[in-house]
Amino acid sequence: MFQWNKLGKVFSPQLVEGRSWLKEFAQAPSALVFDDFVRIYFSCRPLADGNAQYVSYSAFVDLDRADLFKIKRVSEQPILSLGNLGEFDEFGTYPVSVIRDGEELRAYYAGWTRCESVPFNVAIGVATSRDGGETFTRLGNGPVLSYSPDEPYVLSGPKIRRYDGNWYLWYIAGRKWKLVDGRAEPVYKIRMASSSDGIRWTKLNKDLIESRIEEDEAQACPDVFHANGRYHMFFCYRYSSHYRSKEKGYRIGYASSSNLIDWVRDDAKAGIDVSKDGWDAEMVSYPHVFELDSKTYLAYLGNQVGRHGFGLAVLDGRLD
Amino acid sequence: MKWIKLGKIFDPTQHRMPNECVQFAQSPQALVFDGYVRIYFSTRSVDLSNGKFLSHIAFVDMRDNLSEVIRVSDKTVIPLGGLGCFDEHGIFPMSVMRHGDFIYGYTCGWNRRVSVSVDTAIGLAISRDNGLTFQRIGDGPVLAASLHEPCLVGDGFVKVIGDLFHMWYIFGTRWHRSSPDAIPDRTYKIGHATSFDGINWVKEEGRMIIGDRLGTDESQALPTVIEIDGRHHMFFCFRQSFDFRRNKDRGYRIGHAWSDDLVNWTRDDENPLLDVTPGDWDSDMLCYPNAFEHDGKVYLLYNGNEFGRFGFGLAVLEQ
């Protein structure tokens, strides 16, 4: 058994100054450990435009390795520009997952476009960095993982990992657009693909995590962590309608696997829930587990899916 | 080689069509049956919610002489895709081929965007009733945008050669504007992919297999490939990326290339094998070719003015 002891909110985008593209939201934290700081990538937004439409950028904040609540630096620019006219990532790059690859860093990100009948579509892109993760350049103007017969739209939430020399991508794929009070809301499920080079992917074409709260449960952010001989997945899930509320909003779920393919879900073990009050009293979502100096941390989002930033918790117990 | 024009053979305004379609018979695609030739095409209805077009597949069965209409499909051949799917707002074109007892239909599905008008991808639908109706293998496409083919993957034409499925198709290289206030236009090029099952494809990924004749702003569309006397011939259409709808000097013409190895293609349309006929239905534009063999002859179906609003015609190869 394990549980996560909450340490509090660590980053608030509203406190950052001088960046018109970073006004609200710090979503989908993803950590990369450096010698004397921990870089947390996240996705943020400028204020909404005149039509109440957002774009999203990805950026980073460097936390002091000796005191994670001390912010050393916030990136001066987004790590990646938006895509060109008509391309899959023209209106957003969110979320992002970064991994080291030799001298380079590689970022897998979800690119957003806007559609007429539904609000958006999403596909997964890839970009590399040669300056230690400060800026990234696309490997191509199109997506590296796109739609297919069983995954017709909304490929998002990439989480990149390497095990035994292979590349693995956990992500979500849209299952249906559900009309709720006249608004199209996406239902998506957790999926996986594998690759020998991180470019040419083979999809498993299977839902990894069975739905629990309802058939149309939406699942997001499949964050996989290897510890004690097993693979542990923390993810988040919500109801398909009226999910911008405490009752039907995101919670963090848990599953484990011995082979990366067959997963047993057991949300009771997740070890984290909403607080009685405060910044994460309505929702907890977008979990990301990382190890630092013999401790295991969980970065996650609170109310309004990270509009006001992300927090940290530390593992109490053993992941097994 | 030379194409001898046989004239317009089908006018959609003279027939009753399914899905409340009234005009357009675009991108004719032939499938030869015993005693008749079925020609699939894309026609259009009007989306009542916003006045925009929706493209639907229909077919006409023609007698062996290819001049007499037997019937026009009176039912939906393939419904449009569901909410948010790649083919929600139209299927144009659908390329058909026999495979075993079934007929494979490779669809080009259209879905509308906000910053640009549309994106497309290629789906697969299979007919088990001799081509009357087609069922998708899934809600999503078999070929879509990828790392070096960022948008507008469409117009798939598939042929099995040896043990391999070959697909020639188009991919968008970019959206751009002729002037800062203009509506965005697209540029696309012909690409190639192969597959062992017709479902899982490996692209050449961004390789433009046909050289440009009009420069980088040349748009190439609708490849069709046929073997004639042991050599592979590709017909397609090409145009300028801007001002191509009304300016007949910038509109679609039929292009040609040939290959002996399916890798290297030699473009050969400086002297067109088929050209516009002043004063006729194809005086301004030639587009959407489909080559097929029938009764020992090689034919080419194609559209003329206004992208096929008033039908398609036929030419026969003089060798």
Image (spheres, grey):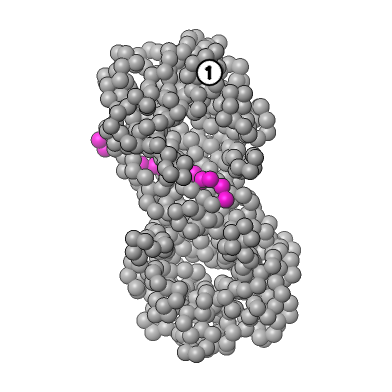
- Residue A112 in view (yes/no): no
Instruction: Give the residue displayed 39% in from the left and 69% down from the top.
Output: B242
Where is residue B162 drawn, in percent x and y? 54, 64
Q: Please say if B59 is above or below B136.
A: below
Start and end of the magenta stretch? A117-131
B85 in magenta = no
Q: Please say if A216 is above or below A144.
A: above
Q: Nearer the viewer, residue B233 or A223?
A: A223
Instruction: Assign the N terminus of chain A to one quadrant of the image.
Output: top right
Residue named by callout 1: A281
Q: Quadrant of residue A247?
A: top right
Q: Nearer the viewer, residue B172 or B261?
A: B172
Q: State how many labels appear.
A: 1
Q: Quadrant of residue A21?
A: top left
Question: Mark 1 falls on what kind of element?
Answer: loop
Q: Residue furthest front?
A: A50
Instruction: Give the residue displayed 54% in from the left and 56% down from the top.
Output: B111
A121 in magenta = yes
Q: Nearer the viewer, residue B58 or B123?
A: B58
Where is residue A112 drawn, in percent x and y? 46, 44
